[in-house]
Image (spheres, rainbow, N blue to C red):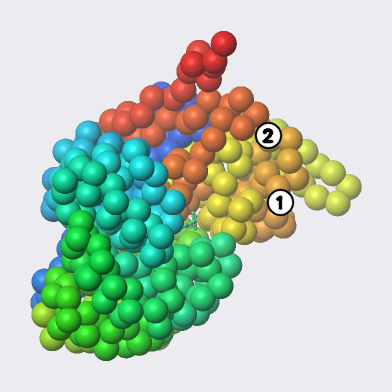
Amino acid sequence: MHGFSYNNGSLFCEDVSLSALAAQHGTPLYVYSARTILDHFTRLDSALAEIDHEVAFAVKANSNLSVLRLLASHGAGFDIVSGGELFRVIKAGGDPAHCTFAGVGKTREEIIYALEQGIYSFNVESEEELRYLNEVAGELGVVAPVAVRVNPNVDAKTHKYISTGKSENKFGVDFGAITDLYDRASKELPHIKLRGLQMHIGSQLTSIAPFIEAVEKVTPLVKELKEKHGIEFWSIGGGIGIIYKESLASGSVDWWEIQPEAERPLTIERYGKELVPRLKDLGLKILLEPGRLIVGNAGLLITKCLYEKKGSAKTFKIVDAGMNDLIRPALYEGHHEIVPLTEPSSSERFKVDVVGPICESGDFFCQDRELPDFQPGDHVALMSAGAYGFVMASNYNSRPLPAEILVNGATATVVRKRQTLDDLIEGEI
Ligand code: LLP
């Protein structure tokens, strides 16, 4: 579900008018729905209820402290990829003992920080990293809990930049090399505790098939590691895709449920139904690392139309958000629905490019898309921007970062202030 719908002709987030928020806080403006975030989290948690499991939110998708606090207070663990993300989780009241630390390039400082904080597991991506971790843990006189990331060589069939489970990707250790590595590590690395196994085949997967393929392929390996090394968990990663292409009809629309069953690419419930029977007899704790699924459709980016420029070939709607605020269209050809905050009174559509103010041709949110009319001064929302939106924003072109708002029922809280011009130059001389 998501918490955005028209109410008397005006787009709302839960019980809050988005036009009112735009008027009060300016644009570009990220807005998140707490109800939607929790709905996704609890539905996934319930879909796995039959097995011992933990949902570890992938912080990289949305690391706002208030979003993390909301999830922590409802029992989420966290999947982190840097010392900075661990710092955020701790500041938000999350428990390091429920954090897993992924990533191919952990630094000495990050490793020490995570060891000191007592994280649940380091998800290790190479033998070199495993040996280094052993060395640093030894220096500190502690034992580092680890899971090696197995690369199952499964095609996730997603955009090449976010596919991670094939042998040609930089991630994880080859499937065929894992047993050997665990055997050697248990003999040679006294400051390592082999606690689990991890995998993640890619992001924005819209079919269940690659998940099933990966789970079935890795299951015998997991059983062997449990028997030989007593591992206690298996993280099957994140990657569950969301629906980006869906126009917002009037009234409350559930983007999962408006799809006829046969055409639904992947639902939370289907994910649980297919995977739980395959996992439940392993006697292992199952970890999930979803990011996009939890927050993607729970957020949008409001932007204001500044100009309409009619060229000989195209009509451009120039808006005040740019690729520095939301980079997904430029980087992954990501599709975000564009919806006027005032419900269109006519069904007429016009072919336009919606573009930002940045000095790059890649700075567009859509090209040749049929959209309802909107004019300079009007606001539109870029939908499904809750994941990999603000977190990937930058100050390119010296543009201050947008503000972020978290809505809960009728309450809207500024959870990150808009940057000022002074913020832009802080730390520079
Ligand atoms: N676990 C690991 C090890 C990951 O690398 C990722 C995402 C996740 C979990 C969470 O994946 P999710 O459930 O969100 O699909 N910026 C890109 C997505 C990059 C994903 C990187 N890794 C985008 O905007 O599409």
Residue at 49% across / 16% down in the picture? Answer: 427
Mark 1 secondary-structure assignment: strand
Query: On the rendered structure, is 203 left or right of 222?
Result: right
Q: Amino acid at mark 2?
A: Pro
In this orientation, which residue lies closer to the viewer: 234 or 274? 234
Residue at 58% across / 38% down in the picture? Answer: 324
The image position of residue 39, as x and y in percent, is: 23, 58
Quarter of the figure that contains the N terminus: bottom left
**Residue 134 shows which numbered tag?**
none
Quarter of the figure that contains the C terminus: top right
Q: Residue furthest top?
A: 429
Q: Which residue is mark 1?
A: 352
In the depicted structure, whether residue 374 falls above or below residue 235: above
Query: On the rendered structure, is 314 left or right of 280?
Result: right
Q: Is mark 1 within 8 Å of ligand 1?
A: no
Is residue 163 visible in the rendered image? The answer is yes
In this orientation, which residue lies closer to the viewer: 398 or 142? 142
Query: On the rendered structure, is 63 left or right of 226?
Result: right
Q: CA distance from mark 2 to mark 1?
A: 16 Å
Task: Of the two numbered discs 2 and 1 on the same chain, state the one appearing first in sequence.
Answer: 1
Q: Quadrant of residue 254?
A: bottom left
In the depicted structure, whether residue 38 falls above or below residue 395: below
The image position of residue 13, as x and y in percent, is: 34, 44
Graded by Cα atoms within 10 Å as few (under 14), some (14 to 19) or many (20 or more), the crowding at tag 1 reads: many
In the depicted structure, whether residue 239 falls above or below residue 174: above
In the depicted structure, whether residue 262 falls above or below residue 111: below
Q: Residue furthest front?
A: 188
Q: Residue furthest right?
A: 312
Q: Which residue is mark 2?
A: 357
